[in-house]
Amino acid sequence: MSEAGRPRLSAVPGPADRDRFWAAIEDGLDELARGLVARIRAELPSYALLPESEHFRNVRSLYETMTRSLAEGAPPNPEVLQSIRASARRRAYYDMPVYDVLAAFHHAHQELWEALRRSDLATESLLVELVGPMAHWSQAMSQAVVDAYVAQQGGREQHERETRARFFDVLHADGPGQDATDLMRELALDPDGEFTVLVARNRWWPRESVDALQRAGRRITGVVHADARAGLLTIVSQGAVLDDVVALAAEVGGESRPLGIGLTRPGLAGIRLGLGDATRALRLAEADGRAAVRFETDWFAAVIPDLAPLLGPLLEPIRRVAGEQPDLADAVVAYAESGFTLRGTGAALALHPNSVSYRLTRWHQLTGLDVRSFAELALSLVAITEARRNT
């Protein structure tokens, strides 16, 4: 350290010495504040979001408050800490990282200490006296910043939670949803974009699990919003890889919990249709004991329970045959799933093609349905599915 930079050795300074010291420090606060603002904005790019004039006023006021408090030997009072918290909340409003704000307050502490140490009126005994109070100020400022960010984040989460609830109110309502566009934008969703809906049974998803899933959704690319009501957990995702969303649901709710996945569709109307898709897929997942069913690949089986009431008179005699002759029903299903060939069906059932032909002919004789006709094969499959579902 140079002689000019080394504080003078002296006895404990008297009142007059202290007054001169603090007066000199106060005279240099404008320059000190300008230098700190320049340093912070050069080293922390996020501070470009904060208007420079506001930034300077904040720093100048903080330095004035700190120096007067240190001169009086007083700790940071509640009003001062409230002012620091208010400044921190303002930075949170600008989405400035808390780490940058803490770094800026650290720079403020560091620069003021250097100004105290470099003063021509500084003495070693005076600086030693200031070590404790300066450390107290640093700790108090850091805690005030953290408290402000925690409170601000809590407020944001509460606002987002309320907005999400209103959005799902609109989603589940029958009306056109005039407020949906604004709500979707507040939730970082593109109202004109495409959405995928996933559903699970509400009984497997207590509120804490839904909240955990919502938090976990921030770890993946895209936007995910979850809500539990009307017996269902509903997940609306946009821009997310579907496998990532399914993996998160399994991670939070358990891999064995059935999940239905709807078609990807555009807009609010698409979300509502996707909710229906996903609910049908969930019903199939539960019936088959599967962890996840995608409507895209299993749409036919997923809609059969909706078709059955419409086709009741047609289905009843066929369903009875399917229940009484399960080997014939197995042959029909295998035929549909094996490329509509006797050889492929025989391989699937470990039967000779002639045996397959016999079973399909017998099905025709008992039901009047020829599986070589698309419509009659489809009706056969609906009846067989319903028969199996009710056994």
Image: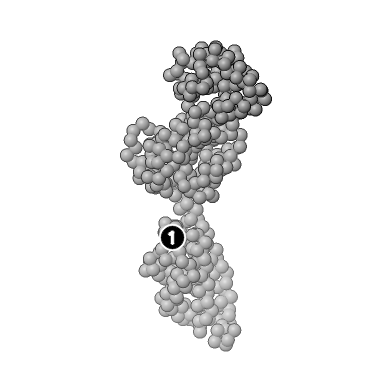
Residue 174 higher or lower than 13, as above or below:
above
Q: Position of residue 358 (x, y in %)?
A: 61, 17
Image mark count:
1
Q: Is residue 131 left or right of residue 42?
A: right
Left or right for 201, reference 355? left
The residue under label 1 is which amino acid type?
Arg
> Of all residues shown, which one is farthest toward the bottom?
3
Q: In the rendered view, does 173 fall on the left or right side of 69?
A: left
Which residue corresponds to the image point at 42% horizontal and 59% vertical from the top-left? 94
Quadrant including the C terminus: top right
Residue 44 in view of the camera: yes
Q: Is residue 179 above or below residue 14?
A: above
Q: Residue at x 67, y 25 (%)?
A: 350
Compared with residue 197, is residue 125 higher up or lower down, i.e. above or below? below
Q: Residue at x 59, y 41 (%)?
A: 251
Q: Which residue is mark 1?
A: 91
Q: Residues within 10 Å of mark 1 (few under 14, many from 20)?
A: many
Q: Nearer the viewer, residue 219 or 10?
A: 219
Q: Position of residue 122 (x, y in %)?
A: 53, 81
- Up the image or down, 152 lies above or below 373; here it is below
Direction front: furthest residue: 354
